[in-house]
Each structure stands twice: as C-alpha cells, then as structure tokens.
Image (spheres, rainbow, N blue to C red):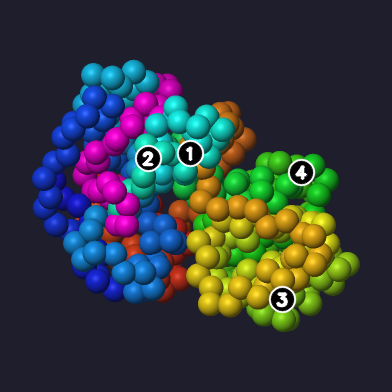
Amino acid sequence: MRAAVYGGPGDIRLEDRPEPEIDNSTDAVIRITHTAVCGSDLWFYRGDDEPETGSRVGHEPMGIVEEVGDDVRNVEPGDRVFAPFAISCGECEFCRKGTQTACTNGGFWGPEGEVGGAQAEKLHVPQANGTLVRVPDRYADNEEVLEALLPLTDVMGTGHHAAVCADVGAGDTAVVIGDGAVGLCGVIASKRLGTERIIAVGHHEDRLELAEELGATDTVASTGQAAIEEIQELTHGGANHVLECVGAESSLETAAAVVRPGGNIGYVGVPHIDDPSFLEPLFFSNASFTGGPAPTRAYAEELMEDVLQGTLDPSPIFTRTVDLNGVSEGYEAMDEREAIKVLVKVNE
C-alpha cells in the first residue's frame, strides 16, 4: 500500500509499505477514505521536531473497517469509522475518567507515535474497541456529513477541550487566541456552549473573517503588546475565559496577560517555549492554567450527535482538498498559509 512518510524538513513523500495485519485479538484494520493535514504536523515539517526519517505521518483517520480481531466487539467489517489522534483501550483508569490521551494501553499515530500514520491507504488500529467511533449506517456514505465529522478526530475535539478547560458557558465572554483550525474550532465550541461574546485573536484577515462567520463577535488582528492592549480594552481589563490554541511562547504570554484574576486559561496548543516566565503572573492572580492534549475520544459521541443533527459543522476549516498523491502539496499549502486545513481524500 502507499503511505506518506517524513523524508526530512520540508519533505513529505509517498512510499510503498506493507499492508497492516491483525497482530492481536483487539486490533482492527481500516481502509482510509478521509484524513487531513494538521497544524501540529508543521512542527516536524519545518524541522522544529525531528522524527525518524521514513516515519509514517498523519493522525486523523476515517475509513471503512476491513478486518477485526476475535475480541473486537464494537465494530465489524464494513462499518464506517473514525478515530481520535490518540489510541485508547476504553477500560483503564484514565479512559474511564475521560482522559484517554493518558491511556495505559494506548499510544499515538505516527510519526513520533508507536503506530503508523493515518495519511495512507490503510491503517492498523490497536485497541479498536476503545479507539474507533462508529458512524451510524444512514450517514456512512453522506459526504457532507463525513467532512463535518472528520474534524472530530482532532481539531474540533481539541477546540472543544480548550473551551471546557477555560470553563466557558452561557453568557460568558471568551478570548480565543489563534486563527488556525484549532482556534476556529475553539470559536465554534464556545458558541456551541452558549458564550455571548467571542473575541478571536490572530493575524490573518481571511481567517478572522471566517472566525466571524463561525460565531466570533469581535476580532483582534494585532500581535504582541498591541494585541494585549486591544483585548484588555475590549474586555475592560481582561476576560475570565481564555482559549490558547497555538502553543507558541508569544500566544501563551498573550493569554497570561489578558486573563482576569481568578479566571481560566484552557491551553491546547503543544507548548514550544524557551521562557516560562509567563506563569508567574498567573500564580499571583490565582488564574487557572488547565489543558493538555485533548481527550477527543471523550467528546466524540457528544459532538457527533450535534453534527448528525445539523447543529454543528466544523467543515469550513477545510479550505483545500487533495488526494493521497497531493499530500506533499497539502503540507506546502499549510506551511505557506495558503490553506487553513487540508482535507485528504484517499481511495476515492
């Protein structure tokens, strides 16, 4: 089968790899039909992280079950399924309390995980009972629904996690820092939870326009101290609910500067920082700083129900579509900020 692999900074290529097989009774094999390029993939694409050359890439799988092990009971061949970016058993202490990203029997899809990447024709799925989410049959071939469900594998669940950790709710004011796919999904999540005022912060006018279409009531296009001052003016001194959706040092510093004393920052961007001094003002203001890799499996059924009912649609974050042959072009488009998020259709 063909699979996208990491060839070094700026180099994503297709290679022939052995087809996956059932190794354990709890495994499944799926034929990938849809996947995506994630903003977090750009860290290794740009050379900021260094996975092993030749590692398979991608962590947002959707497809059709082809084969299952003897102990797989939640899905069967022919089912349409999707899977979060984290593998989870569904039975350990952490899965039972909704922290599947800490599953004692789990792991992550490549390139730095223990299992091959999802930007491929097929995928080996360990812990299929806990990991795979079955799409109801009546929606299994509805392309519009499938494209709205695919973000639940990562960015929509991650944006929702930021909103949950920031403790947003009905009537609140929330500041969403970041205008990438996760930040835009943070806007969607905040609106879904009833937030009255949503301030989207970024520096790409087209993305901030989309943020407004998705529910943002205000936008801030400046950066650094100028952005902090503008947010503070809009919120009369800061917000109680801040979603940090980037992970860069500058965005974390902005979040710390605009949260009110006693407020909440939900952070879901993978931190890439050299100076953690932004934490000190949070300590003295008794502001909470909560987040981490989103347990998207914990939110999957809840969010899927809204997608199927037509009340949730994160698919506008996909601004370019490629086939598997075009994966490298998808990475380049996202790296050049020519696309917010790239949808990859496989086996079409």
- Which of pointers 4 and 2 lies earlier in the amino acid sequence? 2
Secondary element under disc 4, as helix, strand or loop, is loop
**Range of magenta residues:** 111-138
Question: Gap between marks 4 and 3, in whole Å?
Answer: 24 Å
**What amino acid is labelled 1 in the image?**
Gln
Q: Is 253 in front, or is 159?
A: 253
Question: Gap between marks 2 and 3, in whole Å?
Answer: 40 Å
Regarding residue 253, the answer to whether it shows in the image is yes
Q: Which residue is mark 3?
A: 227
Disc 1 packing (10 Å; few <14; some 14–19; many ≥20): many
Question: Gap between marks 4 and 2, in whole Å?
Answer: 32 Å
Task: Say whether marks 4 and 1 touch (CB < 8 Å).
Answer: no
* Mark 4 or 2: the one toward you: 2
**What amino acid is labelled 4 in the image?**
Gly
Q: Residue at x 58, y 77 (%)?
A: 275
Q: Is residue 11 above or below residue 243?
A: below
- Which of pointers 2 and 1 lies earlier in the amino acid sequence? 1
Q: Is 177 in front, or is 338?
A: 177
Q: Which residue is mark 4?
A: 169
Q: Residue at x 20, y 52 (%)?
A: 3
Q: Is residue 273 left or right of residue 166?
A: left
Residue 301: percent from left, percent from top: 52, 30
- Picture disc at residue 106: 2
Task: Say whether marks 2 and 1 touch (CB < 8 Å).
Answer: yes
**What amino acid is labelled 2 in the image?**
Gly
**What amino acid is labelled 3 in the image?**
Ala
Q: Residue at x 36, y 47 (%)?
A: 108
Question: Gap between marks 4 and 1, in whole Å?
Answer: 24 Å
